Image (spheres, helix red, strand yellow):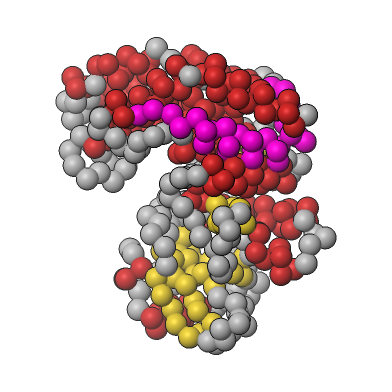
Amino acid sequence: MNNTAFSESQVRSLVSKFKIDAGIASIKPFGSGHINDTFRVVNDDPNGKDYLLQRINHHVFKNVPLLMNNLVIVTAHLRKKLGTLPKEILEKIILTIVETKDDKSYFKDADGSYWRMFLFLKDTKSYDLVTTEKQAFEGGKAFGSFQALLSDLDPGLVKDTIPNFHNIEFRLANLQKAIDADKEERLKNVGPEVEFIMQRTDSMSEILRLGRTGILPRRIVHNDTKFNNVLLDSQDHAQCVIDLDTVMPGYVAYDFGDSIRTIINTAAEDEADTRLINLNIPLFEAYTKGYLQETAGFLTGSELQSLIKGTLLLPYIQAVRFLTDYLEGDHYFKIHFTGHNLQRARAQLALVNQLEIHKVKLEKIITNNWFKIN
């Protein structure tokens, strides 16, 4: 279901379930997300607060009460850590959940759909693509600060909303099943890609092994650190980290690696001509500076060393997922043409190859910036 499937009267009825102190001037579909249905509720007082009403996709997030409990725990912890700031500032830099009239964090309608409401953050913007070093630096600061503020929150309090999300062993097992089944008879098209992936299964599992032995501590991390999950103000300063549905226990390298995956590539995620895939190293350095500036106070030496591993791992995981979907018949990721998932997988593997070629240089950038701060 999409935003247009709801009439204004339906949405107004849903809005009435929440504790809002406003008359409603208008209700408009908002954003371009593919997971949840979102509406902006505009206050009839231009100086008043606006709201976001959102239908949570319970087919993707199968345990909505658990998900919302995570959000309550995480946002409450962030507020506690920043509690000396005025309320109006906190509402700008931390997502504010608006409760229902019966004091819950979500409303379940008669059709079994789940709805939630947030304060709308006015005068902010997000970017799908990073184009300047300032933006990259601010993104690093935003996700670094987010991790730092949550570094003392017990990971046991927050549960998995999507189990095995960044578990490479789970993703590789799914790929092997797809290879064995070959139900679409596509395996003949992917020999080099499968070989590339299988040659790296041991090295790409290192973060998991280090975590299991306790060398890498489990922490609360975002798990979906693409750049448009940071809202910036009018001056391109980071203001608020959003889209907290995937906030779960994990390793800091996951967030670092996923951010780098989305900013360092000089070409599109699904670039057909892999010769165009190179690295924007100045953006990498700017993000790293911002990130380490915020995380230097809590990162362990092992976590610092894991950042380069995460940089390699996250595009590798994405390639494994794209290739698995291709072999299974393209049932998970939306495609625009036959072979789109294979093209995506090839592009991500080309990115992994470039990252491997420049690994020593990237590692030096991380280390040098760490020593500058410490």
Return the x and y of residue 49 as percentages of the image width and height.
60, 77
In which image quadrant can residue 343 be found? top left
Is the stretch drawn in magenta largely helix, strand or loop?
A: helix
In the displayed structure, does residue 243 sit left or right of residue 306?
left
- Establish if 2 lies above or below 170: below
In which image quadrant can residue 144 be found? top right
Q: Is residue 300 magenta?
A: yes
- Asked if residue 230 shows in the view, the reply is yes
Q: Residue at x 47, y 38 (%)?
A: 263
Q: Residue furthest right?
A: 84
> Which residue is more in the foreground, 220 or 175?
220
In which image quadrant can residue 85 be found? bottom right
In the displayed structure, does residue 225 sit left or right of residue 105?
left
> Which residue is more in the foreground, 140 or 6?
140
* Magenta residue span: 277-303
- Which quarter of the image is occupied by the N terminus? bottom left
- Establish if 220 lies above or below 11: above
- Which quarter of the image is occupied by the C terminus? top right
> Which residue is more in the foreground, 113 or 296?
296
Q: Is residue 345 magenta?
A: no
Return the x and y of residue 152 as percentages of the image width and height.
76, 41
Return the x and y of residue 4 as percentages of the image width and height.
32, 71
Q: Residue at x 56, y 69 (%)?
A: 122
